[in-house]
Image (spheres, grey):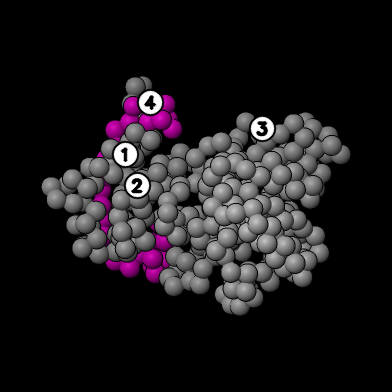
Amino acid sequence: MESTNQFKAGLVPIIGRPNVGKSTLINSLTGSKLSIVTPKAQTTRRRILGVVNSDNYQIVFVDTPGVIDPAYELHNRMMKQVKKALSDADVILFMTEPNDDISAWEEKPLKNYVDLMQETGVPVVIMINKIDTITKDRVETLRLQWEQWLKSKFSEGAVVAGSALTGEGLDQLLDAIVGFLPYSHPLFPPDQITDITERLWVAEIIREKIFLHYRQEVPYSTDVIVTDWQDKEHITIIKAEIIVERESQKKILIGKGGSAIKKIGMEARKEIEQLLGKKVYLELFVKVRRDWRERNDYLKYLGYE
């Protein structure tokens, strides 16, 4: 076991608005696809841990849902996860991107989360993401703006510019975070990079395919739960339910002659086989659970605390 006077470790929740790149960052830093990534906002719904290990530090990143003004009970539970992550933080990683309006963080509902960040009293590292999409002059302007904002809100912190997609600036980001971490024993074994179960991982892969292939309200009205898992010698048999709110959504998901659901299943199965390293038989069922995003019983069934 590492000596605590040399080794640093801590929990670092990633906070930011939807689509600033939190999931892309956690996947880049861990070198594994832990969080699903789509161009649509609010893809991440659950708290997901990603552990970055080094000889002298361990950073436990917490990918959280994007900060929103809740419209459903599901959203309330997502925002509870953000608040819980903040309350456990050793350092907060606040992610922004070039189109993020600083002034919006001075008004509710976003200001509520700034207040919570201030209450923790822990250092805040701001990452300006997606700098590969703007000029160097624009990067410097944003850096100065966010540094001024940081100093006005928090007693300790740093601003780093980078790109979760290209990897630019990520070494500087890790250095900045490690500088604020407490001395501690590792929180997880050195070979562990997440606390996600294989069942949840598989459900998230299926949900990602739905987000990528469907438009408008269908992805947001959908969730996935693995209901049966049988490991056999040469194959794993998985059954999963895709939950929707209305019959019309079920018809869209299934498609003509089952063509749409078959495509989702094929794409998900290929990725799941890569994850598990063996052949997979995947069977998908679409179930209507009216207004599940507002129903405590359904939300509990789907694992939202």
Q: What secondary structure is found at the residue carrying circle 2?
A: helix
Give x and y (percent) for residue 207.
Answer: 37, 49
Is disc 4 surrounded by few (<14), some (14 to 19) or many (20+) residues within 10 Å? few
Is disc 2 surrounded by few (<14), some (14 to 19) or many (20+) residues within 10 Å? many
Q: Which mark is residue 267?
A: 1
Q: Are marks 4 and 3 in contact (CB under 8 Å)?
A: no
Q: Which mark is residue 209?
A: 2
Q: CA distance from mark 2 to mark 4?
A: 20 Å
User: Which of the two discs, 2 and 4, labels the residue nearer the N terminus?
Assistant: 2
> Looking at the image, is 132 positioned above or below residue 40?
above
Amino acid at the residue labelled 1:
Glu
Residue 118 figure quarter: bottom right
Q: Residue at x 63, y 49 (%)?
A: 162
Q: CA distance from mark 4 to mark 3?
A: 25 Å
| In the image, residue 283 lies in the stretch drawn in magenta | yes
Amino acid at the residue labelled 3:
Pro
Q: Give the residue pinned by disc 3.
A: 190
Residue 299 figure quarter: bottom left
Amino acid at the residue labelled 4:
Lys
